[in-house]
Image (cartoon, rainbow, N blue to C red):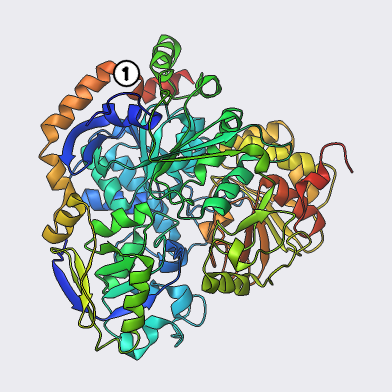
Amino acid sequence: MEPLRRITAVAAPLLRDNIDTDAIIPSREMRSVSKTGLADGLFAGWRYRTIGGRDADPRFVLNQAPYAGARILLGGENFGCGSSREHAVWALREYGFRVIIAPSFAPIFEGNCVRNGLAPVRLSVETVAALSSQVVLDPQAHRLTVDVEQGVVYSDASEPHPFELDGESRAMLLEGLDAIDLTLKHLADIDAFFAADRAARPWIYPDLAAMDHAS
Amino acid sequence: MATMGPRSLFEKIWDPHAVRELGDGSSLIAIDRIFLHERTGSVALKSLAESGRPVLDPSRVFCTMDHIVDTTPGRGDATRVPGGSAFILETRSAAEAAGIRVFDVRDPLQGIVHVISPELGLVLPGATVVCPDSHTCTQGAMGAFAWGIGSTEAEHALATGTLRIKRPRTMRISVEGRLAPGVTAKDLALHILARYGAAGGRGCAVEYAGGAVRALDMEARMTLCNMATEFSAMTALIAPDETTFSYLRGRRYAPQGALFERAMGVWRALASDPGARFDHEIVFDAGEVSPMVTWGTSPQHAVAIDACVPPVEASGTTPEAHARALQYMGLELGQSLIGLPITGAFIGSCTNSRLSDLRRAAAILRGRKVAHGVRALCVPGSMAVKRAAEAEGLDKVFIEAGFEWRESGCSLCFFAGGESFGPRERVVSSTNRNFESRQGPETRTHIASPETVAASALTGCITDPRDFAAGEV
C-alpha cells in the first residue's frame, strides 16, 4: 500500500449528505473479480449522461476543467454509507483520490479507506463548507494541503484545521503497512487463544461432516 | 482492557474475544464465524490465494451464492449480470480450494447469506460473526456480535482468524410498551431512522432492548437488526432469551443435546447487567410507531404511511438534499403518499424474505389479484424458506394473486441477477435501501413492510396495510 504523509492537491466539493457506495460505484460497474478496472465507473450515475454510457455530464464536478487532477474530495455527512463494497474505495483510489474530507463517515467505508491508502479526514460541517466555498473561487489556485503526520488540513488562505485519526489508522496510512503481516506477528497468541477457546466453548467448533450425516 | 463493574451485552462478548490489546483502544478480536458471498467474498478469496497465505480455519468459514445468481426457476451458473458468471465460478473454485463449505447455486441449503446463516444454526449467541456485507448486523438478533467488513478485512480474518478493531462506542435503544397491531419490526426500524437520522447510530454497537423488542419473534428481530447499517451503526445486538434458544434448538449446525444445554448455560448470562453503562441511551414508547413508508432517497426519508411528504424542517435533511430527493422521486411537498400509483412491487431481501414475512403478505393477498399494470415479485430468502412456504401453499397464493415466485437470492433489492426496474418506475419494496438507482436506473423506490407491499400491489397505489386487516374484504 502506498504511504500517505502529506499531499497538496486540487480539492473537489461534492457536499451531499449520505453519499452511498452504490452512487460511488454502481453495482453494474463492478464487472470482474478484481480490485482494478473501476475508475471509469466512479460516480457513473452522476458523471455520465446515460446509465451505462460514457458521455460526460458537464454538470458533475469531476467533469469540470478547474477540478482536473483533483486528489481530495470534500463530502457531506455519513459519506460512504450503504453497501460494504470495497470497490467504492478502490474506484476512488484508482481515479486518483488520496483524501476524503467529510463531517462523518459510514463505519465500514472508513475502515476500507484506511486499508487502501485513502485518508478519511473528519472536519466539522462548517469547516468543510468554509473550505469548499474557498476552493470553488479558483480550485487550481486554492489547493488544499492534508498533512496526515501532523493531523492538519490547510490552504494558502486558511488557518490549519486539526483532525483526529486513531493511532492504528494513522500508522497504516503513514507507513503503508500490511495489516495481515502485523497481525501474524501475534500468531502464537492467536493459536493459544483458539486452543484454549476450543476447550471452553466447544460449540463454536462444529464437526460439519458429522452434522451433515445426522441431518 | 476488560470492563470493570456492571457490563453490557456487547462488553460480555467483546472482552473474552480480545486476543490481545493493540493500544489506542484497538484490540485483536477473535472471529468465530466468517461468511462470504460471491460478490465481495470472491475478491477476498482470490487476493488471499494470490498472496500464498492459507485460510487459518476453513471449518468456520461458510460461503453462499446470493448476489449475482439468477432467481428465475431452473437457474444455473448463467446470470444476466455482465461478467457475472465469473463471480460464481471463481468463488466456487477458490472456496473449494481453501476447503470452505459452499452453499452453491443448486444446493437445497442455498439462500441469502443473512437468511441462511441463522436458519442453519451457524450463528450462535455470544459469537463474533463477520461477512464482507453491510447487512451482517442482521445476526445481532441472535445475541451475536456481527458486523459488516470490507474485502480486505475479510482477507485478514480468513488468514489470521482475527480482526484488528477499535472498540466501538455503545448505544442502547429501549423500546417500551408494545407495537400496535399492524405495526411491524420494519416499521420500527424505519421509525428509528426517520427520528434519529441515517447517521444517528454513529458507528456504535447498538443494543435493542425494552418490552417491545423482547416481544418480537426471531425473524422480526432480524428485520430490526438488519437495518442498523442504514442507521450508520457498527452493528446491533439483542440479548438472547428463550425466544432465541427455542429458535436455535435442533437447527442443522447448532450444537446438539448436552452440548446445547451446556452452551445455553453460558448464553443465559449474555444480558446487560443492571447499571451497565452506554455512551448513548435512547428510550421511547412503541405506541409512537405507525406503519411507515419512505418518500425520498435515504432510508431516513421515512414517514407514517398516512402522512404527507414532509417539509424540509421536518425531514432531518438539508434543503438541497430535500429538493434533490423530491425531484428524483417525482414528488411535491405536502403530497400524500397513500394513493401514489405504482408499477412495481417487490417482496424479498435480507430484510424481509423469511417465512413469517411471506405468511403476513400472503394473508393480505389470499383470494385477491394484483392491480393491472403492476409487476409484482416474491423472492424467498432461502431455498428452505421457499420449500416451507410451498408446503403451506403460500406459493399458490402469491402466484394466483399475480406475483412471480422465484428461487432465492438478493434479486431486485439491487442489480442482483442482472435485473432491474425501469427508469422513473415507482416501486414499493420490502428491501432496505431507497438510494438513487438502487433498484434500477432512476427507479423510484419506496421502502415498506411486506404487508404494505402486498396491499399496494393489490390496489396499484401506496396503500395502508391496515385497510386489509384480517376479516375485511
On screen, residue B266 above or below B403? above
- Front residue of B402/B85: it is B402
Residue B146 placement: quadrant: top left
Residue B58, given in percent of the width and then of the height, sits at: 29, 34
- The chain carrying label 1 is A
Which amino acid does the dot numbered 1 rest on? Pro
Q: Identify the image quadrant of the N terminus of chain B.
A: top left
Locate residue B414 relative to residue A212 in the image: left or right.
right
Residue A59, given in percent of the width and then of the height, sits at: 46, 86
Locate residue B4 relative to residue A192 in the image: left or right.
right
At a point 33% along the width and 70% down the height, the residue shown is A127
At a point 22% along the width and 36% down the height, the residue shown is B56
Whether residue B9 is visible, yes or no, is: yes
On screen, residue A120 above or below B28? below
On screen, residue A29 above or below A131? above
Residue B144 placement: quadrant: top left
Locate residue A54 relative to residue A123 in the image: left or right.
right
- Front residue of A76/B398: it is A76
State the residue position of label 1: A202
- Front residue of B373/A3: it is A3
Label 1 CA crowd tier, 10 Å (few <14, some 14–19, many 20+) = some
Q: Check disc 1 and report its element: helix, strand or loop.
A: helix
Residue B272, given in percent of the width and then of the height, sits at: 42, 26
Please count the marks in the image: 1
At a point 26% along the width and 16% down the height, the residue shown is A199
Residue B84, given in percent of the width and then of the height, sits at: 44, 59
Whether residue B395 is visible, yes or no, is: no
